[in-house]
């Protein structure tokens, strides 16, 4: 019996970007179930979504969402060229194996998530990140199957951490 896939998160860093905002870097451990490997190998496109949010905790009201960002990747297999293709927006990269494509998908780098001027040095926030297979972008018959079959579930729960905005030139905590 095939086991459901898993996504683990490790080494998440929110660091100052060159333009004065903040960029995110993270590493994921992606483990596909046998069913997902077969599906993508037969030409089914899989969409992965990473979501980030930065909130300011408030004791008197709901937490304030200061920044929110999402990024989507599309993983496909092209039988004619025998290559896997990983796309985000108009950019794409081809790979000879699924393992290579997953290695690149599992490394998120230089993702601008906080625009310049949104946060001030010394402020404390709660940052959150998650990544998941977006089953809503599958063809309808697969969406129905995903409702009752754990082999189609590939997601990481929200990973949250406290983030203190560093002083200019300092490191994020």
Image (cartoon, rainbow, N blue to C red):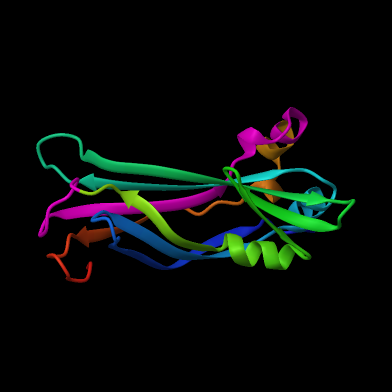
**Residue shown at the point (56%, 60%) measured from the top left:** 7
- The spot of residue 152 in percent (x, y) is 68, 46
Q: Quadrant of the C terminus?
A: bottom left
**Residue shown at the point (20%, 53%) measured from the top left:** 125
The relative height of residue 142 versus residue 101 in the rendered view (above or below) is above
Instruction: Decide whether residue 39 is among the magenta residues.
Output: no
- The spot of residue 34 in percent (x, y) is 78, 58
Residue 106 vs residue 163: left or right? right
**Residue shown at the point (17%, 60%) measured from the top left:** 165
Q: Quadrant of the N terminus?
A: bottom right
Q: Is residue 158 visible?
A: no
Question: In the image, which residues are magenta?
Answer: 117-143
Residue 160 vs residue 55: left or right? right
Q: Quadrant of residue 23?
A: bottom left
Q: Quadrant of residue 135?
A: top right
Farthest residue toward the front?
Answer: 19
């Amino acid at each position: 019996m095939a086991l459901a896939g898993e996504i683990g998160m490790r080494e998440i860093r929110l660091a100052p970007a060159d333009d004065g905002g903040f960029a995110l870097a993270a590493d994921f451990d992606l483990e596909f179930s046998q069913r997902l490997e077969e599906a993508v190998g037969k030409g089914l496109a899989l969409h992965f979504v990473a979501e980030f949010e930065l909130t300011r905790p408030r004791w008197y009201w709901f937490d304030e969402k200061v920044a929110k960002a999402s990024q989507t990747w599309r993983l496909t297999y092209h039988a004619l060229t025998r290559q896997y293709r990983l796309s985000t927006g108009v950019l794409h990269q081809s790979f000879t194996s699924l393992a290579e494509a997953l290695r690149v998908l599992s490394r998120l780098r230089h993702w601008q998530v906080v625009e310049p001027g949104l946060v001030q040095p010394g402020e404390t926030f709660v940052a959150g990140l998650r990544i998941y297979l977006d089953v809503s972008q599958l063809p309808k018959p697969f969406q129905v199957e995903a409702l009752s079959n754990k082999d189609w579930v590939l997601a990481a729960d929200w990973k949250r951490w406290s983030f203190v905005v560093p002083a200019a030139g300092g490191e994020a905590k």
